[in-house]
Image (cartoon, rainbow, N blue to C red):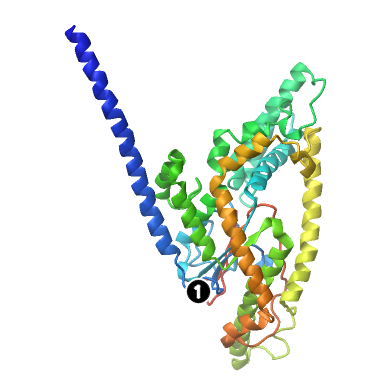
Amino acid sequence: MDHALRLALLLVLLAKVYPSSSAYEFEHCENTVKQWASSSLHSTNIKDGHILKDLLFFLHKLYSNSLECPRSYDKLRFDPRKQNCKLFATHDDYSIMSKLPREKSSVVTILRNPIDRVFSAYEFSIEVAARFLVHPNLTSATKMSRNLGSKKSVISTLDIWPWKYLVPWMREELFSRRDARRRKGPPNSYGDDSYNMEEIVTPLHEFINHPVALDLVHNGATFQIAGLTNNSNTWKVHDVRHCVMTYQTLGNYVLQVAKRRLDDMLYVGLTEEHKESATMFANFVGAQVISQLVGTETVNYNKLEQGSLVSKTGFHTSHNQMSVGKLMETYETCVSKLRSTQSKRRMSSLRRIFPANFTKEARRHVPEEVLKQITLLNSLDVELYKHAEIIFEKQHQKLLDSSMPVSRWQMMNSNRSYIGNAWEVVYLSVFIFLVLFIFLYVKAKRRISKLKI
């Protein structure tokens, strides 16, 4: 009897201690996230955030290949304090700002509808993974990937976050399902829903509930802008990320940080309004870049002229006249070629998983309950996108109210008033996914970095 009583008392004690321990863990996480959010909001308060500074997280590419820094899609491959280059390409989140001079930085981004972004991540992962089906088996495909990765001069999709996690996962799934079809023989029918052909690809409803997708895909835009992805450059934020992933109610703190950072960005675009985004980008950002670089070239020209190192007629002969209008013309040409190239490559990949075919029409057949679940899993991104739409509309109205946007930026940079020739090669490249490029001037505003999400 005494033994039973002691056991009962022990159970009562455990029942009291366990919830206390759980409550303590939540309180610890709440304090951790609150402290991070407070610190982030304070550091995000950038003066004159809508005026172009020396460093720019960029949506487009505005400089020639000859000015590119060593590509750093997988890791930072150069010292931004010493490298004398203008264009630095990498995949990262906002935490990369910790390695760059914040007071000399401007940030630009383009957001995508959260549901479309999940579809895109699913489709692109499978598209890239399907390219490996030319190999007889997974072992052969994996060996080829390792050989490719050993070449220091080559950066493949498998080196780039988050595809370095998503593509191998989908690749293994594709080979596993192909092997099963070869053993059992093809079914009589695959059905007409490309997003639920489990004999060929991982169904969408399985993808969105998988731990990898929960970690990398859902609320990806919010976590990237907050600098809280699993690829963050700041190790201390991983505790914050763990707390937010464990206690979803703490996600609102992350959302507020992401919203504030959008507010302070030089420009915010929307993938669904791509043409208008490009137009506003050219007027708000492109005009300032042109004004800055032309002014820098003029200063260099004056120094050279004073030193009698070049003639007046020879200094600008290798440069093309550049303006916002010319920027848009170049964009139209570039985006047309890019879309054509991407379309051909996509079709080639999808042929390997026929009859699965990811199209806008096929998306309409996805069950409503799956769409609702995607929306629920991306609740932070849904709210962030609504905020981005408000910012986008304000930018649109600002553009309508501005009759001479180029002159406006020239006045803001009156110390660089000479309007001359700009770049030898200036072009824009547009990507389907959330994209961030860093452009960093390191010496005398001559270094630029590029960040792609």
Residue extending furthest toward the left: 2
Q: Which residue is at the front of the view, 42 or 62?
A: 42
Residue 237: x, y in percent? 42, 49
- The image shows residue 98 at horizontal and vertical percentages of 45, 60
- The spot of residue 249 in percent (x, y) is 44, 43
Residue 411: which quarter of the image?
A: bottom right
Determine if residue 143 is in view: no
From this viewpoint, which residue is outermost toward the top? 1
Q: Which residue is mark 1?
A: 48
- Direction from residue 409 to residue 278 in the image, left or right: right
The local secondary structure at tag 1 comes to loop
159 vs 177, left or right, is left
Residue 193 x, y percent position in the rendering = 76, 32
| Closer to the camera in the image, 316 or 209 | 209
Q: Which residue type carries mark 1? A: Asp
Quadrant in which the N terminus appears: top left
Q: Quadrant of residue 368?
A: top right
> Up-down: is 310 above or below 143?
below
Q: Within 10 Å of the Cα at label 1, are there few (<14), some (14-19), or many (20+) other Cα atoms?
A: few
Q: How many badges with numbers are in the image?
A: 1
What residue sits 51% from the left and 48% below the top? Answer: 231
Pick the front one: 160 or 253: 253
In this rendering, the answer to whether 159 lies above or below 94 is: above
- Picture layout, residue 157 above or below residue 278: above
Q: Can residue 176 be seen at all in this image of the molecule?
A: yes
